Image (spheres, helix red, strand yellow):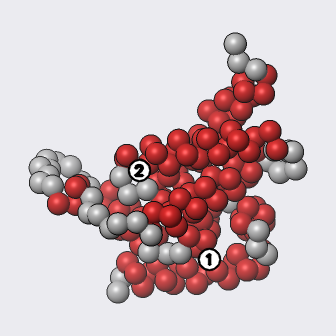
Amino acid sequence: MKSELEQKFVNLLEKHQNIVHKICRMYADNEAQHKDLFQDITVQLWKAYPKFRGDAKFSTWMYRVALNTAITLYRKQKRGIKTQNIDDVGFKIEADYYDDTTEQNLKLMYAAVRELNDIDKALVFLYLEEKDYTEISDTLGISEVNARVKMNRIKKKLRTIINP
């Protein structure tokens, strides 16, 4: 039988799990890494949950813990051995009727975002989640003005990366 604390955590995690999946997509290159990162973030959320005071919304707190976990693991991974994703070199058969324009644009966008530093990635993620600059600044621990300025610079940088 689950404790009340555990049940409450599981319910909140299930309700807001898309936050974690989106962060995983931002920081993971493939499905295996996505699953590993999701598991690591879930463990960190569970470890930190007893300290959650409710000063902020659960989703804001969840963003902060998840992003910090992803950034920490991303930095460790960057120090590791560089490998190539098998999907990039494998043969693919595409049906004639399938229009993958949206999928290709998303891949371009995610590839461009992966070139950003870890804090900028987090800012882009929160921006794409349609968070206002107040919530972005609270989550990342920067001023609202700084968040706006950084976002404008990131937009320019992404345009340059996507359209060199």
Q: Position of residue 35 (x, y in %)?
A: 44, 43
Frontmost of labels 2 and 1 is: 2
View extreme (top): residue: 1
Determine which residue is flagged by label 2.
Answer: 33
Task: Tell which of 136 and 13 is nearer to you.
Answer: 13
Secondary structure under tag 2 reads helix
Q: Residue at x 69, y 78 (%)?
A: 148
Q: Position of residue 71 (x, y in %)?
A: 57, 63
Q: Residue at x 88, y 50 (%)?
A: 55
Give the mark, 2 or 1, whose residue is nearer the N terminus: 2
Q: Is residue 161 above or below residue 74?
A: below
View extreme (front): residue: 80
Q: Residue at x 44, y 74 (%)?
A: 115
Secondary structure under tag 1 reads helix
| Residue type, numbered disc 1 | Met
Q: Is residue 15 visible?
A: no
How far apart in space, not on screen, are marks 2 and 1 (Cα)?
27 Å
Query: Which class describes the residues within 10 Å of circle 2: few (<14), some (14-19), or many (20+)?
Result: some
| Residue type, numbered disc 2 | Gln
Q: Is residue 95 above or below residue 134?
A: above
151 sits left or right of 61 in the view: left
Query: Which class describes the residues within 10 Å of circle 1: few (<14), some (14-19), or many (20+)?
Result: some
Q: Position of residue 30 (x, y in %)?
A: 36, 52
Q: Residue at x 69, y 56 (%)?
A: 64
Determine which residue is flagged by label 1.
Answer: 151
Rendered image quadrant of residue 90: bottom left
Rendered image quadrant of residue 102: bottom left
Task: Tell which of 98 and 131 is nearer to you.
Answer: 131
As drawn, the label of residue 63 is none
Q: Position of residue 65 (x, y in %)?
A: 68, 53
Task: Tell which of 38 and 60 is nearer to you.
Answer: 38
